[in-house]
Image (tube, grey):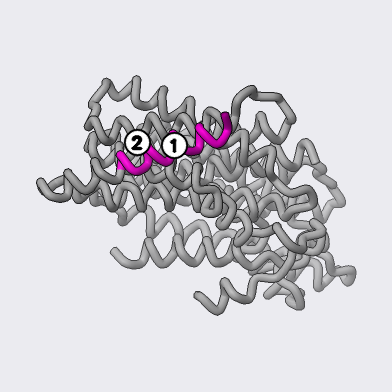
Amino acid sequence: MVRPLVIIICMIVVLALPGTASAHSGYAGATGFTGGLLHPLFVPAHILAVAALGLLIGQQAPRWGCAVPVVYVIAIIAGLGAIALAVVAMLAENTLLGLAAVTGLLVALARPLRRSIGWLLGGAVGLSLGLDSPPDAIPLTQAYVTMLGTALGAAIILLALVQVASRLRRDWQRIGMRIFGSWLAASAILMLALRLTR
Amino acid sequence: MLACLAAATPAWAHSGGAGSGLVAGLAHPLFGPDHVAAMVAVGLWGAFLGAPAIFILPVVFPLVMAAGGVLGILGVPLPGVEIGIAISAAILGMMVVLAAQPPLWLVAIMVGAFAVFHGHAHGVELPSGADAAAYSAGFVIATGLLHLAGIAFGLLARWLAGRFAVRAAGGAIAIAGLMFLGQLA
């Protein structure tokens, strides 16, 4: 009962620790595997999208099964693979914010959804997150290690959130999740508007 | 966690500095008495109305507020924003005093309409060069926490003395709203 609150408070704290956004490297001073691992936690668009997706998957459990996280992880690997092939996605961060808004809204609505919607959202969030995580490292080996860390970090965060959200069964906990979903959606909408206008 | 919050540093890539970041976003609604009064009133009224209003209002408000915020960010003019905010405190406070129980759809429309004014004001007042991401998240969270504070106090309405206290708080908010309105006149 306490753990969901702890997770939510930790997420607020993470947002309170903005670091230097130098091509949004994960954490100031951290490079390689650690930098990659922390990357999704320290980029607001990433954490918003992953948090919203994690809450939605947990909310839809057990209807959606474990296929959506699998699709999400495969999509992250595909996105990172595309980066390795020198694909540059200019709008990946904006796409992530748009997906965070839609997914947060779905959490707030709390309606039963088809599994295919989960696959679509999981794939889109994973792919955008992968495409928006180009490593700063120049040496090829270090770049691959950073990307491995990013994939692992993004997967762990999602799975942790799914675990927490799927255990929220009491009425007040489900209501809290809907309210938090609306906060995620509202934050994402505002950030997207700011990114597009300033 | 307090240490983590205290360790927040400027987000240089966005030319942070004073007035930016999550902490500034969190503080922004808290230092506007008209905002605080209206947000707390939303929570009080929701608690007074009971389920499902008690959770629908805190879900509707941030979402519609974000839409208002987008209008403000885009520079779309909205006449009478400050008057709308002051009126929102007065009317929402009055609803609590009267223990009004209109249909839920009407409550949601009223609260949503007021949310547009609050969101527009936040969007316009966003400091230039602010760490937009953290700032936006900050004021959404602060707004939500003010609702929750109102709900927590409003739950006292389960008891007779608490009901009186909640309605008295609504009265204080309504009077404050009228004072805000008077200052604008």
Label number found at residue B93: 2
Q: Nearer the viewer, residue B161 or A196?
A: B161
Q: Give the range drawn in magenta.
A: B170-185
Identify the residue position indicated by label 1 in the image.
Answer: B177
Query: Is label 1 in a helix, a strand or a loop?
Result: helix
- Is A137 placed left or right of B146 in the picture? right
- Is B34 placed left or right of B161 in the picture? right
Return the x and y of residue B43 as percentages of the image width and height.
34, 43
Label 1 neighbour load within 10 Å: few <14, some 14-19, many 20+? many
Residue A65 is at least partly visible in this image: no
Q: Compared to A155, does B97 lie above or below?
A: above
Query: Is label 2 in a helix, a strand or a loop?
Result: helix
Quadrant housing the C terminus of chain B: top right
Residue B184 within the magenta-colored segment of the rendering:
yes
Q: Which chain carries label 1?
A: B
Instruction: Give the main secondary structure, helix, strand or loop, of the magenta stretch.
Output: helix
Q: Is tag 1's residue or tag 2's residue first in the polypeptide sequence?
A: 2
Q: In percent of the image, x 57 and y 75: which residue is there?
A: B4
